[in-house]
Amino acid sequence: MEMPFALTFDKESYSDILAADSRYDSRAYDFVLDVIHEASESAQGHVTGQELLSWFRDLALDAWGPMAFTVLTDWGVTCCEDVGEIVFNLVDHKRIGKTDSDSKADFIGGFDFREEFLGPYEP
């Protein structure tokens, strides 16, 4: 079995990841690592993709409120599947680990970004 998500949470250069996949801003990787750190500390271990998405939504709203959608889309993160891509880019480049049951499919259909990040602020 591979290591759970939590290995290290140091902010660092993502030049190797960005060279392989330039879809996402480096700040998106920092934020996702922060989310993984918070979620795994709270759970005292591994979290599923769906649990991670819940933490991602809540922490993005806490951090940026009505600007969350704008910030995330500026970084190239427009849907839950993008969060999964970032997570698995981190796995592929040995920044974090995963369990045998973790998959990109865990991030499909988590929630609608527009609804979750803009809906609470629409009149």
Image (spheres, rainbow, N blue to C red):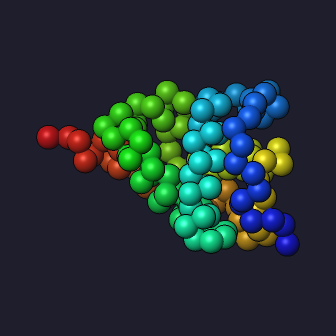
**Above or below — where is 74 with respect to 112?**
above
Residue 107 lies left or right of residue 56; in this view the side is: right
The residue that appears at 66% across and 44% down in the rendered structure is 86
- Which quadrant does the C terminus fall into? top left
The residue that appears at 45% across and 50% down in the rendered structure is 59
The residue that appears at 62% across and 64% down in the rendered structure is 40
Compare residues 107 and 71 and report the one nearer the observer: 71
Residue 99 lies left or right of residue 111; in this view the side is: right
**Above or below — where is 22 with respect to 110?**
above
Q: How many marks?
A: 0
**Above or below — where is 111 with respect to 13?**
below
Residue 93 visible here: yes
Q: Residue furthest left?
A: 123
- Which quadrant does the N terminus fall into? bottom right
Compare residues 20 and 37 and report the one nearer the observer: 37
Residue 51, horizontal then vertical, whole percent: 53, 65
The residue that appears at 79% across and 69% down in the rendered structure is 100
Residue 46 lies left or right of residue 76; in this view the side is: right
Compare residues 112 and 40 and report the one nearer the observer: 40
Residue 109 visible here: no
Residue 85, horizontal then vertical, whole percent: 66, 46
Residue 38, horizontal then vertical, whole percent: 56, 57
